[in-house]
Image (cartoon, helix red, strand yellow):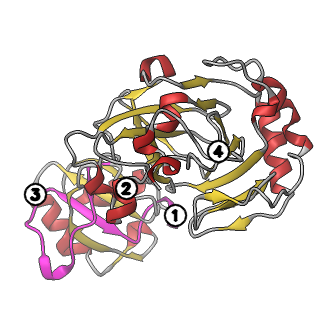
Amino acid sequence: MAKSGYTRPPPIAEDTAPSAILFVANCGPAVGLTHDDVAAAFGAFGEVEGVSAADDSGARVIVRFREPAAAGAAMAALHGRPCGRLAGRVLHIRYSVPAPAPKAPAGASLPVALSSSELGIPGIHLVEEFVTAAEEQELLAAVDSRPWKRLAKRRVQHYGYEFLYETRNVDSKQFLGELPSFVTKILDKIVTFPGEKSCTTKLVDQLTVNEYPCGVGLSPHIDTHSAFEEMIFSLSLAGPCIMEFRQYPKGSWRAPSMVSGTDETSIQDPQCIRKAVFLPPRSMLLMSGEGRYAWHHYIPHHKIDDVAGQVIKRSLRRVSFTFRKVRMGLCDCEYGQFCDSQSK
């Protein structure tokens, strides 16, 4: 990333017009030369307004002269030749070009709510700092000490029942055992979770742990109605993200992207309602009622999020603990349009 607003020029076949700004390779802090050293050496050809990093390598710099003629003289004298004032290093010099504007994160134009009340979707509740920083580290250590199952872009662990990604369901006859003891405190705290209905630990018997590397998200989907009961809890650990909710009035429980194979076509429908909320580390999200049954949820696949005008970088990884209750029969919810039980 250019630090000065200027960057590496295009290949020599697409040479750039003369200017007062040079891109200089093979010099910089990484090879023992300070920016002051560079400014002093190039200052022999004219007034240097500044020297800055061209990228993160530490071995390429941008030299800005006041006058284009001075830049031209420096290039003619130093390009491809050893420079005695710069430890004899052979410099590679080109005229620089303006760096392209940073690409906005996908979905950056969509306002991001900072609370569930601001989000305004019935049945969606968010509690920040649901666990402490110390508890967060204990939970991460617990799952990292157990085997992970690798998917295409992320790793998972399943407890209680295994989630079957091919069918987006579970085999309710294959009970893996009780939920692990390291989530006992979480289950106890769920009792106090604000929501539409009183919560008890009996409402969950299945846990999926997901590890998302930086830049990896989640495709739009509704958790299959026939697989799980109404209340779904998701605890975010180790890093933040944005979760987007989408409602397709003409859709079904399958997101358009699941049918078309591309997410872009799914948001071009003018009737698609989109809302987003910021999930900070250690927060717990409850999806219930309309928010669980009738809205697809989605985590954008990018490395930075735009939240209220602030660019927030994703962490190296984000780990989510998703707690659900396996449904043992058909779903008879009031959202039949999005219900696989009622659309069969």
What x and y, as percent, mark residue 168? 58, 59
Q: Does 177 appear in magenta?
A: no
Residue beneath disc 4:
228
**Label 3 Cα crowd, 10 Å radius (few <14 / some 14-19 / many 20+):** some
Q: Secondary structure at mark 2?
A: loop
Q: Does 7 appear in magenta?
A: yes
Pick whichever of labels 1 and 4 is earlier in the sequence.
1
Q: Amino acid at mark 1?
A: Ala
Residue 54 seen in the figure: no
Q: Secondary structure at mark 1?
A: helix
Residue beneath disc 3:
68
Residue beneath disc 2:
1
What x and y, as percent, mark residue 316? 60, 52
Q: Amino acid at mark 3?
A: Pro
Residue beneath disc 1:
30
Distance from the alpha carbon under mark 4 to that under mark 3:
68 Å
Pick whichever of labels 2 and 4 is earlier in the sequence.
2
Q: Secondary structure at mark 3?
A: helix
Mark count: 4
Question: In percent of the image, x 76 and y 31: which residue is there?
Answer: 133
Q: Is residue 64 left or right of residue 314?
A: left
Q: Which residues are magenta?
A: 4-32
Distance from the alpha carbon under mark 2 to that under mark 3:
24 Å
Q: Is residue 237 left or right of residue 98?
A: right
